Image (cartoon, helix red, strand yellow):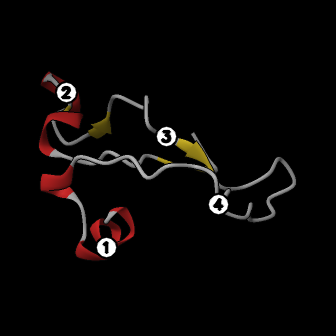
């Protein structure tokens, strides 16, 4: 998936490969993902009316400051 930001990286959303693919790392749960690039590759501006959603335990302090 290109052009998306996951927005919910945490240990429970990271899965490792199995057997022959043991060295693969995959992300799951894209329910909070958002598009940040258009189909032409241009960066999309942040929508100011969009609420910040996050798992606070795994958020950066800059992201949390946006929430407060």
The answer to whether marks 4 and 1 mark residues whose Cβ atoms lie closer than 8 Å is no
Distance from label 4 to label 1 (Cα)? 15 Å
Distance from label 4 to label 3 (Cα)? 16 Å
Nearer mark to the viewer, of 1 and 3: 1
User: In the drawing, what numbered circle is on residue 20?
Assistant: 2
Q: Nearer the viewer, residue 22 or 8?
A: 8
Secondary structure category for the residue under label 3: loop
The answer to whether marks 2 and 1 mark residues whose Cβ atoms lie closer than 8 Å is no
Query: Residue 61 at what x, y percent from top left?
Result: 23, 74
User: Which residue is tagged 1?
Assistant: 65
User: Which mark sits nearer the N-terminus, 4 or 2?
Assistant: 2
Distance from label 3 to label 2 (Cα)? 29 Å
User: Which mark sits nearer the N-terminus, 4 or 1?
Assistant: 4
Distance from label 1 to label 3 (Cα)? 20 Å
Q: Is residue 59 left or right of residue 31?
A: left
Secondary structure category for the residue under label 1: helix
Query: Residue 47 at what x, y percent from top left?
Result: 68, 56
Secondary structure category for the residue under label 2: helix
User: Which residue is tagged 3?
Assistant: 33
User: Which mark sits nearer the N-terminus, 3 or 2?
Assistant: 2
User: Which residue is tagged 4?
Assistant: 48
Q: Nearer the viewer, residue 21 or 65?
A: 65
Query: Residue 55 at what x, y percent from top left?
Result: 23, 46
Q: Residue furthest top?
A: 19
Q: Residue furthest right?
A: 40
Nearer mark to the viewer, of 3 and 2: 3
Would you call the spot at circle 3 few (<14 residues within 10 Å), some (14-19), or many (20 or more)?
few
């Amino acid at each position: 998936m290109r052009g998306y930001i996951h927005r919910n990286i945490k240990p429970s959303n990271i899965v490792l490969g199995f057997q022959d693919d043991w060295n693969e790392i995959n992300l799951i749960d894209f329910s909070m993902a958002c598009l940040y690039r258009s189909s032409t590759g241009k960066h999309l501006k942040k929508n100011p009316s969009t609420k910040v959603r996050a798992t606070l335990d795994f958020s950066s302090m800059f992201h949390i400051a946006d929430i407060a």
